[in-house]
Image: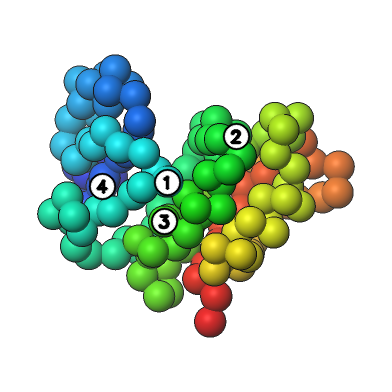
Amino acid sequence: GHLAAAGHHVVGVDVDPALIEAAEQDHPGPRWLVGDLAELDLPARGIAEPFDVIVSAGNVMTFLAPSTRRRVLGRLRAHLKHDGRAAIGFGAGRDYGFAEFLDDAAAAGLEPDLLLSAWDLRPFTDDSDFLVAVLRPKS
């Protein structure tokens, strides 16, 4: 709601129709879509413009089937502007190591701009138990 109310073009995607329905009720304004991130094709759904920023919070990456993680990162990359950024956050101990995630991001054409250990901008260290990766498309 807040970003859309401020005039930003906001799109939210989730595979669970109940969560999309809740988002529509709780946060009117953005465009909410039921969809699989591994098959994300927003131009096919009438959203042609790539995004300046994509945010994936709430451990989304750890809920994905391991076989789809690289594909999801590739689909996110495909929807970013050439100078855009993706901010992706998730916790440790969820069967997706941070190094593996960064390898998957690289394979999907994304590279880190900034690594943090929390959404409040604390620096990432080797013993961090949370990662917020701000990624950009590879040049």
Q: Residue at x 60, y 34 (%)?
A: 62
**Which mark, by number, is residue 75?**
3
CA distance for labels 4 and 1:
19 Å
Q: Nearer the viewer, mark 1 or mark 2?
A: 1
Quadrant in the picture for residue 35: top left
Q: How many marks?
A: 4
**Residue type highlighted by circle 1:** Ala
**Residue type highlighted by circle 3:** Arg
Is 127 or 66 nearer to us in this picture? 66
Judge from the rendering whether residue 89 lies leftward or rightward of residue 41; answer left or right. Answer: right
Examine the rendering and report whether any part of residue 72 can be seen: yes
Could you say where residue 85 lies in the image, as x and y percent from the top left? Answer: 47, 63
Q: Residue beneath label 4, please?
A: 10
**Which mark, by number, is residue 62?**
2
Judge from the rendering whether residue 76 lies leftward or rightward of residue 28; answer left or right. Answer: right
Q: Earlier in the sequence, mark 4 or mark 3?
A: 4
Mark 3 element type: helix
Q: Residue at x 35, y 30 (%)?
A: 15
Mark 2 element type: helix
Mark 4 element type: loop
Is 94 or 112 nearer to us in this picture? 94
Q: Earlier in the sequence, mark 1 or mark 2?
A: 1
